[in-house]
Image (spheres, coloured by chain):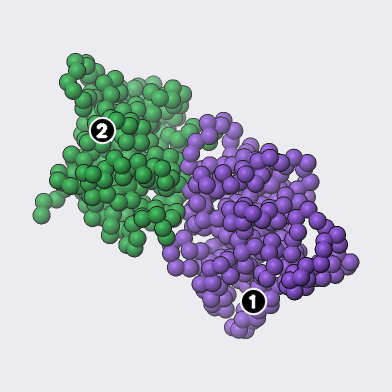
Amino acid sequence: MGEPTILALGGGGFTMEPDNPALDEFALSLTDAREPRVLFLPTASGDPAAQITAFYARFGRRCTATHLSLFRRHGADRSLAEIVLAQDLIYVGGGSMRNLLAIWAAHGLDELLREAWRRGIPLAGLSAGAMCWFEGGVTRSGGPPEVIRGLGLLPGSFSVHADGEPERLPVWLAAVRRGELPGGWAADDGVGLLFSGTRHVRTVASRPGTGALRADAVGGELVRRRIEPELLNAGVRPRDRPIPDEIAALRALRAELRRGRR
Amino acid sequence: MTTRPAQIVAFGGGGFSMEAGNPLLDDYVLSLTGAERPRVCFVPTASGDADHYVVRFYRTFAATCATSHVSLFRRDRSGAVQGDLARHLLAQDLIYVGGGSVVSLLGAWRAHGLDRVLRAAWRKGVVLCGLSAGSLCWFAEAVTAFHGAPRVVRGLGLLPYSNCVHYDGEPERRAEYRRFVGDGVRPGYAADDGAALHFVGRGLHAVVSSRPRARAYHVAPVDGAVVETPLETRYLGAAVPDLAVAG
């Protein structure tokens, strides 16, 4: 078993980018299994059929893909622990973070996911399914954006959809400045932050022109740092890739190459 | 203004969710409201606010009632109640809770404070009803078998008993429920699919059914053994001769 691993997406993947598999490919690359067992948790949206269908469309052919419904009965005799701890990758969908955490806690799934993480089963997710791993985030479960506590597997806070839902960002920054949330990251749609253990090790993107932000409160003032992501090109290693025209993509590629040499 | 009694109708199974074309249980709960055009709000939390379920609710009730539904998952869209949920629920004649997972239902309700709102609605005389998870939730203890082996969870406790649903539909539940009550779970009520327990205040007022053979039972320890007592059940359909078993 490997190091505890989390891929937190600001947005993207099969539920948001049906024509762009880059982030999902990246999530799959986190497991060594030849035919990975991938579990989808659509809890935050109430297990909607559309998300589940999209999951199987993306992962069904190449993986042993299953989803875990906490609303509709499976008829399976297997316990939640048996289901969760037998996976090679666990992928959490977006939706209401408040519902997600409350329902997981009611089923004891929060503890099982913590155990899966400790055992090195990679956890991936977007939106609510990404913020949940941190100490806190900004949810729109109740309409307007508000601060919410997470599971705290990862230190710091996380805010999602920085470009797609810009109304979250000021709420997050203000909460960090006031100390209501610890310092942390915000990510655009299409951007993923990879954590090894509790360390942020990579930032990847499925599209050019996107980014992430690190913000901390220092003496009551915000200190921000922009993070350029590595642009993913599924299936092609950076050196083999044709040089993209897009300047942002070129920069990202250069950064990636620099990192690769080190 | 007359004060209305607190009422809960707990279905072992049945109503529009499970008995398409058989309106007997749904008509019964509507009749309890005493309203000409009852305000009925559907709470499909236990199903994750499944769209098809919400549609079936409206199809069943929209012609005769002032209908609405609550969504805890899709508050931005989908035509669910917006704004002050508590005020809306307290203004209803009937709150109808759908089936699904009672564990997920209770988790989501508590996170949104809906447990307190429903208690207040009950005290105020809003009729509460539901099937399956929508029955279990009102009791102090509920037998659920959603993932893996059956277990007992703590419900809202408006009714200080235990509850088991689908008593005839899922045979293993019967043995499990009796074992639980033998092991210290409080005495309570079990209901078949098509049977409904009607409580006024905290007391059982009547048992009604949408199917001639559906029954409900009181399950309690007596002298060290768990005894299941059939309850007199009134079939709500045409008066076919059906011998109700007296308790």
From the viewer's perspective, tell me whether residue A184 is left or right of residue B6.
Answer: right
Q: In the image, what residue occupies the spot 78% across and 41% down?
A: A34
Kind of residue sitting beneath label 1: Asp
Image position, residue A250 (x, y; %): 78, 71
Circle 1 sits on which residue?
Answer: A216
Element marked by disc 1 = strand
Q: Quadrant of the C terminus of chain B?
A: top left
The quadrant in which residue B99 appears is top left
Q: Where residue B209 sits in the image (x, y, percent)?
A: 26, 27
Q: Nearer the viewer, residue A238 or B27?
A: A238
Q: What residue is rendered at 64% in x and 75% in y?
A: A215
Q: Which chain is green?
A: B
Instruction: Return the mark for residue B98.
Output: none
Front-most of A20 and A170? A20
| Corner quadrant of residue B219 | top left
Instruction: Identify residue type, mark 2.
Output: Pro
Residue nearest the viewer, comparing B21 with A118:
B21
Residue A102 vertical placement versus A231 (above, below):
above
Q: Image height check: is B155 above or below B163?
A: below
Label 2: element kind: loop
What residue is pinned by disc 2? B23
Q: Is residue A22 above or below residue B224?
A: below
- In the image, which is nearer the foreground, mark 1 or mark 2? 2
State the residue at coordinates (34%, 63%): B83
Which chain's colour is purple?
A: A
Kindly identify the residue that appears in the image at 74 percent across and 64 percent down: A231
